[in-house]
């Protein structure tokens, strides 16, 4: 039953919501293939259309599977895509001295094995280095906007999405306001435990205050106490076609150049709205932000710790 729910409910949503990221990371290695052909015209194996289509189809299939199973795992998918792009650029002379068929040649086989081992080792290294470096880029104050139609009545959607002091709404919990009108907002993120790598819900939060705007606008001023980063969001809930035309315009200093691109690639604003719609309708959460934010490496690490192949009990009792 769980498999049927995944295939019919979660899988279509993940592929649709992450479509931009899937396409981008699937197509990125074409740059490496093109560089290989450009540097070694006439001998590059990727100059053969059949070889190129086969390699890219296999890579696109792998990226699609990765996003379906690990929807929050961009920290792994991006390094893999970049590394695969670089490795394809080095394949220009791989089959230059090979016989026919090339894959039967021992040197070609060893070259393929070395590329695979480099890919695995490089991915492990880049997973820890690249995302941290990209997230550390300087933030800039910017403006984002989004509008969508939701099959929910305006007053119902507003009641679910606009945080109010003392209320609990789905995966959000609000506290009492202070003298300035700011009240704490807590929400739960599903992250792997730092030691066991098992799913471990962790509570995070920010503080907010509501400013009633004109003509039905609702303005929310939010601040992250630990960093001081803030946002000012204008939301509007307009009746339309039996549902709601939801609009949001936000000015904030949360993004740098990379995270702003990732926000668009992940269709994150629509994902945010989906989380509330599912809660209103009583459906299981589909939103990417509510799924376990893990990846292949953390799953492997968790399996190794569970079987005492890694961690504090590694090797004991054997």
Image: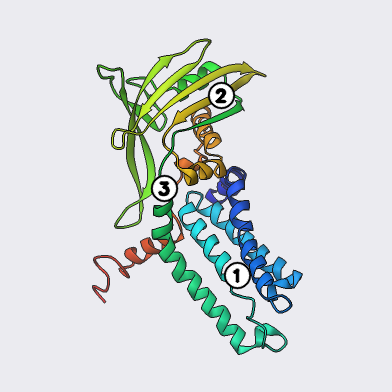
Residue 250 in picture, x, y percent from top left: 48, 28
Can residue 15 be seen here? The reply is: no
Residue 144 in picture, x, y percent from top left: 52, 32
Labels 1, 3: front one = 3
Q: Tell me the element at label 2.
A: strand
Can residue 139 be seen here? The reply is: yes
Q: Along the polypeptide, which appears first: circle 1 or circle 2?
A: 1
Residue 208 in picture, x, y percent from top left: 35, 24
User: Which sits in the foreground, 97 or 297?
Assistant: 97
Q: Which residue is mark 2?
A: 247
Q: Is residue 270 above or below residue 24?
A: above
Q: Tell me the CA gap for discs 1 and 2.
A: 43 Å
Badge 2 vs badge 3, beta-carbon distance below 8 Å? no
State the quadrant of the C terminus.
Answer: bottom left
For the image, the number of numbered tags is 3
Neighbourhood count class around disc 3 (C-alpha, 10 Å): few under 14, some 14–19, many 20 upward? few
Q: Which residue is mark 3?
A: 137
Q: Which residue is mark 1?
A: 88
């Amino acid at each position: 039953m769980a498999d049927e729910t995944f295939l019919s409910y979660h899988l279509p949503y993940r592929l649709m919501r992450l479509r931009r990221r899937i396409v981008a990371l699937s197509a990125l290695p074409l740059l490496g293939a093109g560089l290989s052909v450009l540097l070694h015209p006439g001998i590059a194996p990727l100059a053969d259309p059949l070889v190129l289509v086969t390699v890219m189809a296999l890579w696109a299939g792998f990226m699609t599977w990765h996003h379906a199973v690990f929807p929050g795992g961009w920290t792994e998918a991006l390094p893999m895509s970049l590394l695969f792009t670089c490795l394809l650029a080095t394949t220009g002379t791989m089959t230059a001295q090979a016989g026919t068929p090339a894959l039967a040649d021992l040197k070609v086989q060893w070259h393929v094995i070395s590329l695979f081992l480099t890919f695995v080792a490089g991915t492990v290294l880049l997973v820890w280095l690249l995302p941290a470096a990209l997230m550390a880029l300087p933030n800039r104050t910017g403006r984002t906007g989004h509008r969508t139609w939701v099959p929910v009545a305006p007053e119902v959607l507003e009641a679910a999405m606009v945080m109010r002091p003392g209320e609990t709404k789905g995966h959000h919990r609000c506290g009492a306001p202070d003298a300035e009108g700011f009240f704490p907002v807590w929400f739960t993120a599903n992250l792997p435990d730092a030691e066991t790598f098992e799913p471990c819900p962790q509570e995070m939060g920010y503080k907010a205050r509501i400013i009633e705007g004109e003509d039905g606008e609702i303005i929310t001023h939010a601040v992250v106490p630990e960093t001081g980063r803030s946002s000012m969001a204008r939301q509007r809930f307009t009746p339309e076609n039996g549902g709601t035309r939801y609009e949001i315009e936000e000015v904030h200093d949360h993004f740098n150049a990379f995270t702003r691109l990732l926000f668009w690639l992940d269709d994150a604003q629509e994902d945010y709205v989906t989380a509330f719609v599912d809660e209103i309708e009583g459906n299981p959460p589909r939103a990417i932000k509510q799924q376990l934010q893990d990846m292949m490496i953390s799953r492997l690490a968790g399996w190794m710790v569970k079987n005492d192949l890694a961690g504090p009990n590694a090797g004991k009792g054997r």
